[in-house]
Amino acid sequence: MITYKIENNLSPTEFRDVLIKSTLGERRPIDDMDRIIDMVKNADLIITARHNNQLIGVSRSVTDVVYCTYLSDLAVDEAYQKQGIGKELIRLTKQETPKATLILLAAPDAVNYYPHIGMTQIDVCFLLKDLNDLK
């Protein structure tokens, strides 16, 4: 049976492992443990999925609870994908912040998944990774 819960003290090592097992690690700083530690420590809302106490999925969000929730990481171990775990993590994240709009940037291979579960795709996102790029 898969259990879901809010985890305020998620182990950074477990978080890193599920990133790797989900392929999200390809786009996350998995070789920089200090950043992984800070990613866990500074998140406002972390919801996990576990099977026999093993972490198999995580939703990590930054939120003000009433206006916006940025679901920064949605990771499900590849061995457990296509079982509705990601959708349930999204549902639980939204349930915890019902007044807020849930915002998510899709991994390239998951772009078609989110509309399939009822999320609206928009084309108005902008990124600034380096302050020196600001003109």
Image (cartoon, rainbow, N blue to C red):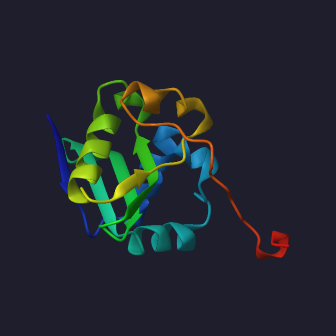
Instruction: Give the quarter of the figure containing the C terminus.
Output: bottom right
Residue 88 x/y as whole percent: 26, 39
Residue 27 x/y as whole percent: 62, 49
86 and 131: which is toward the camera:
131
Instruction: Give the quarter of the figure containing the N terminus.
Output: top left
Q: Quadrant of residue 96?
A: bottom left
Identify the residue shown where x is 40% and y is 74%. 41
Identify the residue shown where x is 26% and y is 43%. 91
Residue 25 x/y as whole percent: 56, 48
Q: Quadrant of residue 44?
A: bottom left
How many marks overall? 0
**123 to the left or right of 91:** right
Identify the residue shown where x is 45% and y is 37%. 120
Residue 28 x/y as whole percent: 59, 54
**94 to the left or right of 38:** left
Q: Quadrant of residue 70?
A: bottom left
Identify the residue shown where x is 83% and y is 69%. 133
